[in-house]
Amino acid sequence: VANDLIQHNYQAEYYLQKVGMDGTWIKIYIQNILMKFLIEIAYDFYSSEVVSFAIDRSENSQVIIKVIKGVSNKMKIHKIKKVILHCDQGSGNTSQIVYNLCRQLKIQQSMSHSGFKGNQKTEGLNRWIKNDFNLIYGNKFNSEQEFINTFTEYINLRNSTFILLKSKLSPNEMIYCK
């Protein structure tokens, strides 16, 4: 189990310095059948951007590995050499395969203390995303793929909106960025 390197300090000085990762369950209907999906999401603490996410029907190390690989891809794109990835001590996060992957990808693991919700920022963002997604798109889809495509579209829209809001462009300048 990794040490808690964040210690409730969610402030970051630059993009991808600190990333929080946490999962949230979402209930949706596919062809009128209620289903639960885990959405594992990694957020950049500097920008609140969703850096990576994966969707699965169960909590397992494979869904976490997909998210970590997404974080690694962002590191490569932005030429970031080291990231602190903060998460809880769930079984997927503490698995040997996840530990080895993080070492291989130069991602430094940080974990909240056992039995303690030490990732409030990420948990809050997950709750907000889940509620916002349901308000905009509802919870009824024709297929699992339609749900995944719609959620991906939502995240892309959310991220591009955050980028525009964080930039100091005037409303007229923002129109030309779309």
Image (cartoon, rainbow, N blue to C red):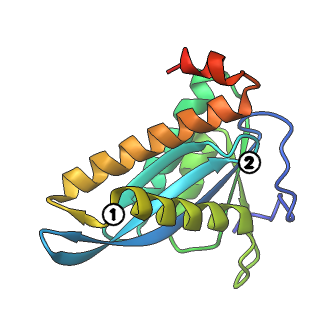
Q: Is residue 66 left or right of residue 142?
A: right
Q: Would you place residue 139 above or below residue 21 in this image? A: below
Mark 2 or 1, nearer chain start? 2
Q: Identify residue for label 2.
A: 45
Q: Toward the viewer: 39 or 79? A: 39
Residue 4 percent across, percent down from the top left? 80, 64
Q: Mark 2 against mark 1, which lies toward the viewer?
A: 1
Determine crowd level at label 1: few under 14, some 14-19, many 20+ residues with C-alpha closer than 10 A: few
Residue beneath the point at 24% across and 66% down:
140
Residue beneath the point at 40% across and 64% down:
134
In the rendered image, is residue 112 in sight?
yes
In the rendered image, is residue 94 in sight?
no
Q: Point out which mark residue 51 bears.
A: none
Q: Amino acid under label 1?
A: Gly
Q: Is residue 8 left or right of residue 101?
A: right
Residue beneath the point at 83% across and 58% down:
5
